[in-house]
Amino acid sequence: MAHTGRRDAPELPDFSLLKRLARDQLIYLLEQLPGKKDLFIDADLMSLLDRIANVTTLKQHEVDKLYKVELKPIVSTSDQLCFLIRPRIQTVKWIADIVNSDKASGRFRRYKIIFTPQKFYACETVLEEQGVYGDVTTDEWAFYLLPLDDDIISLELPEFFRDNFLEGDQRWVTTAGSALRLVYSLYGPFSKVYGIGRCAKMVYESWRDQVEDGEQKARQPEIGNVFLIDRDVDFVTPLCSQVVYEGLVDDIFRIKCGSVEFGPEVTSSDKSLKVMVNSQDKVFNEIRNEHFSNVFGFLSQKARNLQTAYDKRRGMDIQQMKTFVSEELKGLKQEHRLLSLHIGASECIMKKKTKQDFQELLKTEHSLLEGFEVRECISFIEEHINRQISMIDSLRLLCLLSITENGESYKTSSYGIEHLLTFANLKQIGLLVEQQPGETLTVMESKVGKLVNDKTAGKLTDAFSSLAKKSNFRALSKRLVLIPKSGEEYDLRVPRDMAYIFSGAYIPLSCKLIEQVLERDGWTGLEEVTRMLNGHEFAVTVDQTQIKTDPQRIILVMFLGGCTYSEISALRFLGREKGYKFIVLTTAITNSARLLEALLDNHA
């Protein structure tokens, strides 16, 4: 089932070292507050901490009770409080309130705040303003990178996308630069760094400044080249429905920190089960990059093989049975359990995704990508909005229509005036593209306009009249041949290019750019493409001493603003075809729902 590719692909570096470093540093910081203490943890750090240091480890270092940060009065009776938090002003204000409340009641405690991955000046300013700066000690847990799998590392900073691309808040740029520096110091030196996007350029400069400040060690590198790419270089790919198995599992069950919670409908019991989804799961590893249409065939074959392995027991003598039980049975039982789970998950996906609606949805997406039957697509989107099936899906289709047709047409919908800010956000970030002046209203606009009263529609039009961004998707698609020829039959069992991740309809722009730049060893010949993508491209030789060795074929791709599992599957395919190994370093894993939820502002 796994695709065959070149056999000479190099070995990946061992990223477990990143986890060990993070755990050791956390233990060191906890020991700076000797004695028993209660630990308050930010909600979005819970899963992350679980991957680094479990409860037993924390208890060994005198953590008494664990609490989730809930921004309300605390019940802890401990004399020492430790807070492990993201650097957010709201959380720091809550801690200041706890300190001031203790002071007012004459209670003396010791307080320690551990910011991760770093502390910001704004947080310390809040402590000063609240009059508690001298009462608390602050520290940083420089935990930048969580290895999610052999070839995926994440900063686990979903807020990076909104903060940087919508709010223009560049505070995370240094964090991303520091994360890259950590990889460089452990697995470098790199020989070349390529990149495209405004944020990519800033992260590269931040990394370069940090490296120049520190020492450069001469060693055998484990990573050769680096490619930095901004999420806003390619919005089309994350807006498309995922159809590879890992992407579907993420879309439906939400993979969080490399693990997923399967509910009773998957486990066939009354309990939910949390499962790690990575290359250690042998069943998952063989189907993760497959188009969903191939998955059931593989799982049923696997079940037959497993049955054959169990049947071997018949006719064994005592010695053979003893060997079988000690060497094979445990592995077979484990595989049987995983197989049952993935069959359950696949059935769940089938129920949700093979309905008529989903098939129509895919057809509409593919037509939009090809620029084909756009009127029918507009009718489908309009009906989707009118039926109010799912706001996120409606927004996704509107954005896809807008980008692929360069602002073909859109207005707000029957979801109401409380989503005014959301539409303004989508427009500002470039997901809804301004229709050029002078272009006539289409059927879509006039009909959707009727869903709100004329007065509101007028206000909305005014609200959208600024910050026009132009999409060049159609021209880029033609130039980079992102849409395979539609006349040819596409065999999803034997993929011929990266388009298989979208049923043969579209090669992801982000991955095509990476392929082209690596082939050309830079941006030469892609000038028109970079112009359409608003430039900020670069290619820098960092270390000229390296020759064509294995590390040169290990490429670190850093996605700033999030990366989808479909893109990771596409890069794995490209690696197999070209003899590369790709390591994906992302600010967070994303998909269409997460991307759009980050831009929602539905405060009525």
Image (tube, rainbow, N blue to C red):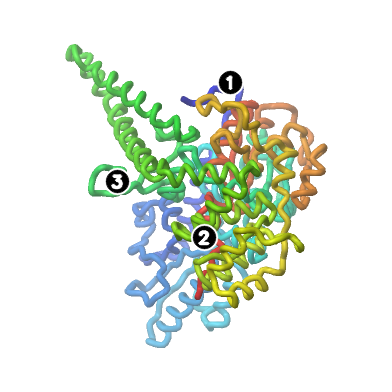
Q: Which residue is mark 3?
A: 265
Q: Position of residue 153 (x, y in %)?
A: 55, 45
- Mark 2 Cα-neighbour bin, 10 Å: few <14, some 14–19, many ≥20: few
Q: Tell which tag, 2 or 1, sits nearer the viewer.
A: 2
**Image quadrant where residue 466 sits:** bottom right
Q: Which residue is mark 1?
A: 7
**Looking at this view, is 331 or 338 the one in front?**
338
Q: Which residue is mark 2?
A: 597
Q: Are marks 2 and 1 in contact (CB under 8 Å)?
A: no
The mark that comes first in sequence, 2 or 1, is: 1
- Mark 1 Cα-neighbour bin, 10 Å: few <14, some 14–19, many ≥20: few
Question: Whole-Å distance between the Cαs marked 2 and 1?
Answer: 41 Å
Amino acid on which disc 2 is placed:
Glu
The mark that comes first in sequence, 1 or 3, is: 1
Amino acid on which disc 1 is placed:
Arg
In this rendering, would 292 be left or right of 124?
left
Q: Give SS at disc 2.
A: helix
State whether residue 157 appears in this view: no
The residue lying at 43 percent from left, 62 percent from top is 43
The residue lying at 51 percent from left, 73 percent from top is 603
Q: Position of residue 322 (x, y in %)?
A: 21, 19
Q: Position of residue 447 (x, y in %)?
A: 57, 63
Q: Are marks 3 and 2 in contact (CB under 8 Å)?
A: no
The mark that comes first in sequence, 3 or 2, is: 3
In this rendering, would 141 be left or right of 331?
right
Question: Whole-Å distance between the Cαs marked 3 and 2?
Answer: 26 Å
Q: Give SS at disc 3.
A: helix
**Looking at this view, is 200 or 116 the one in front?**
200
Amino acid on which disc 3 is placed:
Glu
**Looking at this view, is 227 or 264 the one in front?**
264
* Residue 372 vertical placement versus 313 (above, below): below
